[in-house]
Image (spheres, helix red, strand yellow):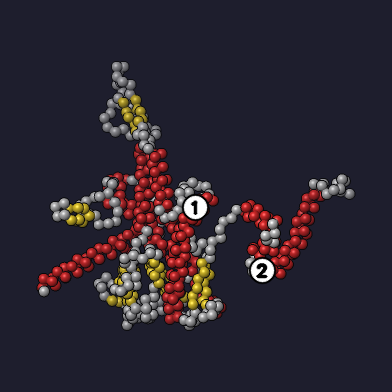
């Protein structure tokens, strides 16, 4: 029995150590992605160096042929990367922002906006409650904030969004995985039982703890500290005033844990592209120019050649080879390096559903064919994103209502249903082809001018459309024909042979 208990304890300790290592690694990867999303140049340089020296963010394991197992190498004693420290130090660090370009091109669901409103049980819009809803959403700039949620959710796979009461209104705090740990429910790993967020409070690093029942800070000594709100009220009992965790979860794809897999490949591809760009510039700077070769200069050391300098050679006899300086070419493959960069750049976009044309580095705009190709490639992904964001917005509204009703004198009714209509993008059309098609339909009496008027003004009735056409006809006859007559008079082509003004 003692043996079984010892074995179980050893297994549990090993499992706990493994989970801690996995959590540290998960946060490290998320932090790398966050640096690229926020364009943190110092952070990007750090990860570039790490990949150049260690080939990635990971625990390096090698096969031990003696023990027949994978062993973790001590990172302090081994270097697994392709570059030496000396090369990494002197190589220029170039950053081309691929991550945000691709995120902007993929996350297009909200390009045309969205309408949000509250419906009663009969499916009709409740005007008074929808007005309160709009005041709340306009208060935190929903168009901008929810788009940020969308982009970060796509990039990190899972984020938390916390509606907070700040300055007498609702605001949204977006929590990315690098700042947060979650204790998942045993029966449902996608549900958070407790949330712990890293935060700088009163000049000290703390953990903000949330569960359905509790809410407090944890300091560096692992002591619980009561939370004080912006009005000076101290939550001495350390209870959760909302009685449930006030966080909405935006998750793009389910996995085997709460967070799932982020777009790590996109950040890593951006790193390697940066490395390739840096290497190309490095080669161009140090190998693109010729290397000086001095012949019979009477010097064995390296000679520095610069403008306004002269190399003196004395005591040269006639039987000696004439002193000279030549420049030998290194034949650096700059053209091939550039082609490889362009190819890799397009492959990165293609891995996310973008055409090579859309990832072109040409300054000219994307062609219509490329746009059509992209729309086909991204159609399925966009429909999926739309479904995900609609579900998220419904959950977000519930959390907003929870926090708003607790703090505000006005209330959002529990009897109403939140609805969001994401407006579809209007497809691009060829104007000349559309005119040709409309003329054909008019000639064949398939449609009438009334149909065209209602198509452009769907709020008009048939009678109003007819009246609008008649009014437009009068205006056109009065002004367009009048302008034509004026031009004819100015050029002497009004039919009067005597164009002299008396």
The numbered mark at residue 460 is 2
Asked which quadrant contains residue 244, the reply is bottom left
Q: In this rendering, is residue 37 above or below 124?
A: above
In which quadrant will I find the N terminus? bottom left
Where residue 132 sits: x, y (%)? 52, 77
Residue lying at the far left in this picture: please name it: 2
Q: Is residue 332 left or right of residue 382?
A: left
The crowd level at tag 2 (other Cα within 10 Å; few <14, some 14-19, many 20+) is some
Q: In this rendering, is residue 26 above or below 229?
A: above
Where residue 285 sits: x, y (%)? 37, 40
Asked which quadrant contains residue 24, the reply is bottom left
* Numbered disc 2: secondary structure: loop
- Residue drawn at point x = 33 percent, y = 80 percent: 213
The crowd level at tag 1 (other Cα within 10 Å; few <14, some 14-19, many 20+) is some
Residue 500 in sight: no
Residue lying at the far top in this picture: please name it: 319
- Residue drawn at point x = 63 percent, y = 67 percent: 458
What whole-number distance in Å separates the C-alpha atoms at marks 1 and 2?
A: 36 Å
Residue receiving disc 1:
373
Upstream in the sequence, badge 1 or badge 2? 1
Where residue 385 sits: x, y (%)? 45, 63
Seen from the viewer's position, the closer of residues 350 and 23 is 350
- Residue drawn at point x = 40 percent, y = 64 percent: 252
Q: Is residue 79 left or right of residue 40?
A: left
Decide: marks 1, 2 in contact (CB < 8 A)?
no
Q: In this rendering, is residue 239 above or below 81?
A: below
Residue 468 in sight: yes
Where residue 210 sits: x, y (%)? 33, 75
């Amino acid at each position: 029995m003692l043996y079984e208990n010892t074995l179980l304890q050893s297994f549990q300790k090993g499992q706990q150590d493994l989970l801690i290592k996995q959590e540290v690694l998960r946060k490290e990867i998320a932090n790398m992605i966050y640096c690229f999303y926020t364009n943190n140049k110092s952070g990007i340089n750090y990860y570039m160096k790490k990949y150049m020296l260690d080939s990635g963010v990971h625990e390096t394991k090698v096969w031990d042929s003696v023990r027949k197992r994978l062993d973790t190498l001590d990172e302090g004693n081994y270097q697994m990367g392709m570059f030496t420290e000396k090369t990494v130090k002197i190589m220029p660090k170039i950053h081309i922002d691929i991550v945000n370009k691709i995120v902007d091109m993929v996350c297009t669901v909200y390009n045309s906006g969205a309408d949000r409103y509250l419906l009663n049980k009969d499916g009709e819009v409740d005007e008074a409650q929808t007005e309160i809803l709009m005041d709340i959403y306009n208060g935190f700039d929903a168009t901008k904030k929810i788009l940020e949620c969308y982009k970060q959710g796509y990039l990190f796979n899972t984020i938390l969004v916390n509606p907070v009461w700040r300055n007498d209104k609702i605001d949204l705090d977006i929590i990315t995985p690098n700042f947060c740990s979650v204790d998942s429910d045993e029966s449902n790993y996608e549900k958070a039982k407790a949330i712990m967020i890293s935060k700088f409070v009163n000049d000290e690093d703390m953990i903000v703890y949330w569960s359905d029942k509790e809410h407090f800070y944890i300091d560096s000594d692992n002591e619980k500290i009561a939370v004080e709100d912006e009005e000076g009220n101290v939550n001495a009992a350390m209870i959760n005033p909302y009685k449930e965790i006030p966080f909405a979860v935006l998750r793009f794809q389910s996995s085997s844990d709460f967070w799932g897999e982020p777009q790590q490949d996109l950040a890593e591809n951006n790193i390697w592209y940066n490395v390739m760009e840096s290497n190309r510039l490095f080669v161009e700077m140090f190998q693109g120019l010729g290397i000086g070769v001095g012949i019979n200069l009477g010097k064995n050391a390296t000679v520095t050649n610069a403008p306004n300098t002269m190399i003196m050679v004395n005591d040269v006899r006639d039987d000696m080879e004439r002193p000279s300086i030549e420049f030998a070419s290194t034949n650096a493959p700059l053209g091939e390096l550039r082609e490889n960069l362009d190819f890799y750049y397009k492959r990165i976009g293609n891995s996310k559903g973008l055409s090579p044309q859309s990832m072109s580095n040409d300054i000219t705009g994307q062609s219509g064919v490329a746009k059509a190709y992209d729309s086909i490639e991204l159609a399925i992904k966009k429909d999926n994103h739309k479904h995900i964001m609609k579900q998220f917005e419904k959950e977000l509204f519930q959390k907003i209502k929870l926090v708003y009703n607790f703090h505000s004198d006005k209330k959002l009714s529990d009897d109403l249903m939140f609805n969001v209509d994401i407006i579809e993008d209007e497809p691009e059309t060829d104007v000349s082809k559309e005119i040709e098609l409309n003329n054909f339909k008019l000639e064949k009496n398939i449609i009438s001018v009334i149909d065209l008027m209602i198509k452009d003004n769907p709020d008009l009735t048939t009678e109003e459309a007819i009246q609008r056409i008649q009014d437009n006809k009068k205006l056109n006859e009065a002004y367009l024909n009048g302008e034509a007559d004026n031009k004819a008079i100015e050029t002497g082509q009004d039919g009067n042979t005597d164009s002299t003004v008396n």
